[in-house]
Amino acid sequence: MKRAEHLEKTLQSIMRTATKLFLQKGFGETSTRDIAKQVGITQPALYHHFSDKEVLYLDVMTNLSSKVRKDINKVMRKHKLTPNEQLWQITVVLKKHHPVSIYDQYHQAVSLLSKSSQQKLNMILAMNYLQPIAEYFKQPEVELRPDILPQEAAELFLAGISPIFGTYQPIGGHNISDDQRDQLILDCIISGLSKTK
């Protein structure tokens, strides 16, 4: 195998492994040593591709979040779906890409990153998560409350779906499936807990 091909293969392996570990354990609990060990390379070999852990983390988040945005945009182009069906499919996209709460991971990482990396992570969150979700809430069919802006609705939505990621008390007992539980949580976020009169 040529050197360039070998380097590209190693880079892809680093990105896959780093994505898995960062998403499972978070930024703070994942070391470049852990990543290098799972890839089967030395730490200095990893640093040949990425100057430090923050650079690697931001590359991982940029790559992942662009996939999230692309998948949310696909959902938004499905005009035959009702607004509730669209929101459910957006939730499925987020759950597919994130094993734990997006905001939990974000807050843990942002507290450990340098100021410039914090700004980059904030931009990634805004552009690839909040902005496309805000587009959902801008649709007239959604009938967003007049005192909530679409961007605020996107932020509340991301925070509100944290129980879907399994980081909190299971809701609905053991007699319902995970999808039914997630739909119940989503319905409560959108419709509230009280029966409307």
Image: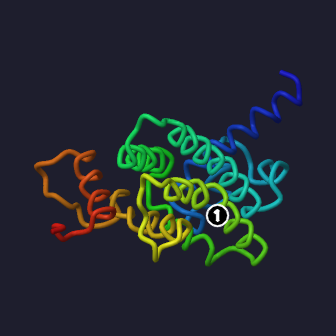
The residue that appears at 83% across and 27% down in the rendered structure is: 5
Compared across the picture, whether 78 is left or right of 38 comes to left
Residue 118: which quarter of the image? bottom right
Residue topped by disc 1: 126
Extreme top residue here? 1
Above-or-below relation of 102 to 82? below
Q: Position of residue 6 (x, y in %)?
A: 81, 30
The residue that appears at 26% across and 68% down in the rendered structure is: 192
Compared across the picture, whether 120 is left or right of 196 comes to right
**Which amino acid is tagged 1?**
Ala
Quadrant, the N terminus: top right
Q: Secondary structure at mark 1?
A: helix
The residue that appears at 48% across and 67% down in the rendered structure is: 153
Q: Position of residue 81 (x, y in %)?
A: 40, 38
Above-or-below relation of 29 to 61? below
Q: Position of residue 84 (x, y in %)?
A: 35, 49
